[in-house]
Amino acid sequence: MSIISPRLRFIEKFLARFNSVFSTEHQRTVFKEFIYGMFSDYKRLSLAAIADNTHTNYQRLQYFFSEANWNIKELNDIRIKILQNQRTTKANIKGVLAIDDTACPKPHAQKTEGAQVQYCGCLGKEENANVAVASCFVSNSKHFPVDFKSYLPITTPNPKNFKSKLDLAKELIAEAIAKGIPFKSVVTDSWYTSTDLIEFTASKNVFLTAEVKINRSIFFTHPQTKQWRYLTGDKIIPLIKEFYPHKLKTAAIPQADGTNKNVLYYAFKSKLRDCSTEVQVIFIFDKWSSTDDKNTHILITTDLAMSVRSAILTYLLRWGIEESFHELKDTFCFDQYQVRHQEQIQKHWIMSFLSWTLAYWIKQNGCLSKILNEAPQTIGECKQAVASLIIIDSSFLLSKNKELAAQLYNIKSERFKKKLKN
């Protein structure tokens, strides 16, 4: 056991639900110590840093990640059940399942399994990195990561059963459905909006609302010839502006400052080239917000009965997955690991998911409302509050056991030890 073993009741209640995943009490203890350690701040996260912070034996932590036999999927399944069993945290049909990938840059880790030079959205350039494709539930009031899959580039030495990012996205969608997570639509950016994904979601009886690239071929009636033909989006845009300006309508889009922005749009039902599923196509002639760098967007939705404004607002929920990525990385060190093998990387990722979920569960259920004058409103504030309570609880434990305090801080002076006992 660690010299200092803080025991916060609401954290213990949450972590106890994962006991069945671990075969020994030793594993359960190290699991708890690691999660407690994730609530501290580190200049650079590592097992050594957590061991030092929690006064835990480093070899125990190392063995837990490299040798101990515990199942990542079981941990995640229990995590989802916890969230789905409470009204304050559960997904609902008003939300969406967002799919995207995120990169963990590792510029100097040339021997890390699965790492390759590829585009990193967080850096805006190519870098040596590991990539995870993830799913996230997002609604207007909540968001939480559902699952992740490691993307192993085809150039990785001897990749086992290579799967593209699109393959992994389809697996994540199918598994979210199997878990019984409700959502009104899958949302993706233009990179994932392939014919394969459109027809896959249709086969699963779920809607897809997504952006498509400007060079995507769309079945469109040419305003001069009155003939239907496939034209790319960049060819259709000037035709709409020239021949149909009187048919443009407006939709009010909420902004971050609480105001609404009216955007012009032109919508029609059609099909994309080489795609058998009918879609509603929406051309938006404006930026989403002041931070948007695109003046025109093309959305499609397989929900033909959805209003245009609802389709736009549904798609914009996609930004919730970006928020989740930021919180996982900035608050719970999703991208800060110093291990090389895929299994260990994935174990680090699930621990980041669990730590984030614990903070989310504490925040959503108001666990700190009776302890603090002002309950935390963000994941970051929740982490800081819990970290402070851990320090207080640890200090209280040491105040009750002066011998442990002297041992922990390597105090030699008998005079100082005597002062501790007074």
Image (cartoon, rainbow, N blue to C red):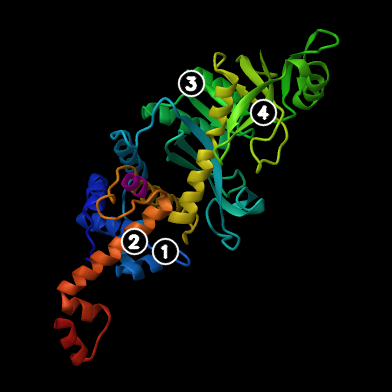
Q: Residues within 10 Å of mark 1 (few under 14, many from 20)?
A: some
Quarter of the image with the N terminus is bottom left
Q: CA distance from mark 2 to mark 1?
A: 9 Å
Q: Which residue is mark 1?
A: 41
**Disc number placed over residue 206 in the picture, else none:** 3
SS at mark 4 in the image: strand
SS at mark 2 in the image: helix
Name the residue: 51% across, 34% down.
98
Mark with earlier residue (1, 3): 1
**Amino acid, disc 4:** Val
In the rendered structure, the answer to whether residue 124 lies left or right of residue 22 reads right
Q: Nearer the viewer, mark 3 or mark 4?
A: 4
Mark with earlier residue (3, 4): 3
**Amino acid, disc 2:** Ala
Question: In terms of image quadrants, where is residue 279?
Answer: top right
**Amino acid, disc 3:** Val
Read off the magenta span: 359-363
